[in-house]
Image (cartoon, grey):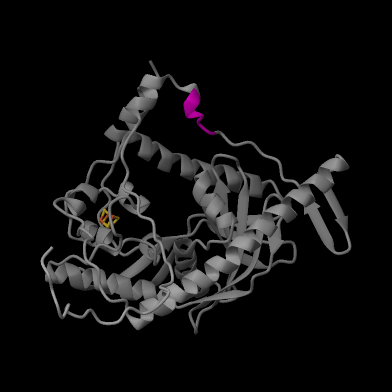
Amino acid sequence: MLAELIHPLAAMGAQEWPYRPRPSSAGPNQCLRKLVYHAREFPRRQAHGRFLVVLDDSSWHEELTLNWIEQSALQLRDRQTEVVCGETVFAGEPYTILGHIDGIVTDLLGIDRLLEHKAIEHFTFQRYAEGDYPLDYFAQVCLYLRGITQLNPDIDEALLLIKNKNQSAYLEYRLHYDLPNDRLTVCEIVHSNGERSFPKQDVIGLYRQALARFAQIEQHRADQTLPDRPYEDDSNYHCQYCPYSRLCWEGHVAPVLTNTVPLSPDMAALAAEYLDLDARIKPLNKRFDQVKKLLKAGLKMEQAIEAEGHGFIVRINQSTQIRHDVNLLPSYVQELAETTLPIEKLSVSRVAQERGPLQADPDPRVA
Ligand code: SF4
């Protein structure tokens, strides 16, 4: 009775947001073509109710996290304060880019930092936890920090706090912004499982790139054009969640690969590097797996979850994961779920000897 009710209700209340240059669409990994479709008001597929509920959940996750922060010794203030993030052109007119910050956090030493909260699903969270940078969120933070310095010039750092919605794990990036040079430095990354690192890595030009992209969108709107698709086919996850995917890929036929062509010197250099890396990675991977097994076995022999000494901590982080075992499903369900997916595999091999130019047989005979 209720399970079927929520998603249609969400779909009924769906709102259309007209395109505006916003901090949340400033990131370099956003599909430019999708933003141009939006700016040019192409018809979009109506969002599924479940997707809208997922988005709504994210804002409630933010509320829950901020409630926890408010119960700590840290101070949280200025929630949803509007800031001016920059100037661009929109619909042929000068346009002020506005944003709303999640808040300012003051630590025990009295240092203020911008807070930006995101709640995301498990797999993207894992990607970030394993080292990928969330560049779109970084770009958003750059815009907010530019806005906040107009209210308080002493704030030059942000805490980007990302919550894993499935497991309530948190990942926190402490980011420093050098405004005149548009340089964002990843100072510190803390995982709620206790892992901590200090990458001190710079990401330069996110704000400049964002303004350039807003200008490109305006140009496409004025010229009534679309930028190229940045992905090879619609299997990319950006396209799978895109409300313009049907329109975008309609009639698109992937070129059939039939030609054999001479390899350029640049491609030959890449092929040589590929083989070289492959030869080096395989034994390293094998040894890496062996070392991992030995470390785990060493802890388990002592019935230990963690061991510390000689400047190292070795720990087994235990968690659970939900997976689908297809063998437990009835065979007719397995058959229904069967689909044919295109697979592309690259193979590179060395040619023993350069073949000479093909020569015509001086004495052709017909067999
Ligand atoms: S379908 Fe893919 S390529 Fe096309 S606009 Fe959407 S995200 Fe971009």
Q: Is residue 325 magenta?
A: yes
Q: Residue at x 23, y 57 (%)?
A: 38
- Above or below residue 328? Residue 302 is below
Q: Which residues are magenta?
A: 323-327
Can you give x and y, in whole percent of width and height, for residue 287 in the image?
69, 59
User: Which residue, as the protein is rendered here, is positioned at the far top?
Assistant: 1
The quarter holding residue 352 reads bottom left
Question: Splitting the image into 4 quarters, where does residue 196 fall?
Answer: bottom right
Q: Is residue 218 magenta?
A: no
Tell me residue 149's x, y (percent). Answer: 52, 74
Looking at the image, residue 246 lies above or below residue 39: above
Is 146 situated above or below 17? below
For the point 77% across and 47% down, which residue is it?
296
Residue 278 in view of the camera: yes
Q: Is residue 246 left or right of residue 125?
A: left
Q: Main secondary structure of the magenta part?
A: loop
Judged left or right of residue 17, residue 309 is right
112 sits left or right of 239 in the view: right
Looking at the figure, which quarter contains the N terminus? Answer: top left
